[in-house]
Amino acid sequence: MPYRSNEDLPASVRHHLPQHAQDIYREAFNHSFASHREETRQEEIAHRTAWAAVKRSYVKIGDEWVPQRAGIS
């Protein structure tokens, strides 16, 4: 199901990602969820897509997700 706000995201996302990363996750999830409406694994695909979107802009260092700096991958 699509998420209307960041407060609706799963606890594992809300409690670990910074606000901006939550925005990225929610927008990517919702877009992917809508794009794969005919798929039996629609929700799984959307979650995987959302995490991939977050990982393009953020990196996990220890227990914290931080923005990636330009030129660092």
Image (cartoon, grey):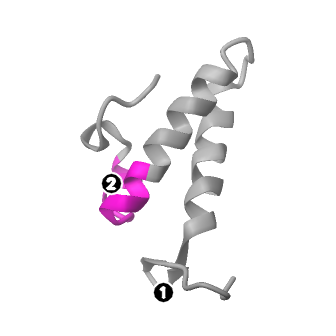
- Report the side of 67 relative to 34 (left or right): left
x and y percentages locating residue 21 in the rendered image: 42, 60
Amino acid type assigned to the residue bearing label 1 in the image: Gly
Q: Is residue 18 above or below residue 4?
A: below
Report the residue at 57% width, 31% height from top: 31
Q: Nearer the viewer, residue 42 or 36?
A: 36
Disc 1: CA contacts within 10 A as few (<14), some (14-19) or many (>=20): few
Quadrant in the rendering for residue 3: top left
Q: For mark 2, does the 10 Å Cα neighbourhood hold few (<14), some (14 to 19), or many (20 or more) residues?
A: some
Q: Which residues are magenta?
A: 11-23
Residue 63 sits inside the magenta stretch: no
Q: Which residue shows up at 38% across the image and 43% down it?
A: 10
What amino acid is labelled 2 in the image? Answer: Arg
Measured from the top left, where is residue 69 in percent x and y?
Answer: 55, 85
Q: Taking 14 as reference, is 38 above or below it? A: above
Mark 1, residue position:
62
Residue 5, image x and y in percent? 29, 36
Residue 38 in the image, given as x and y percentages of width and height: 73, 11
Residue that carries the numbered disc 2 in the rendered image = 14
Is residue 65 shown above or below 53?
A: below
Task: Kindly identify the residue that appears in the image at 69 percent across and 82 percent down.
Answer: 73
* Disc 1 secondary structure class: loop
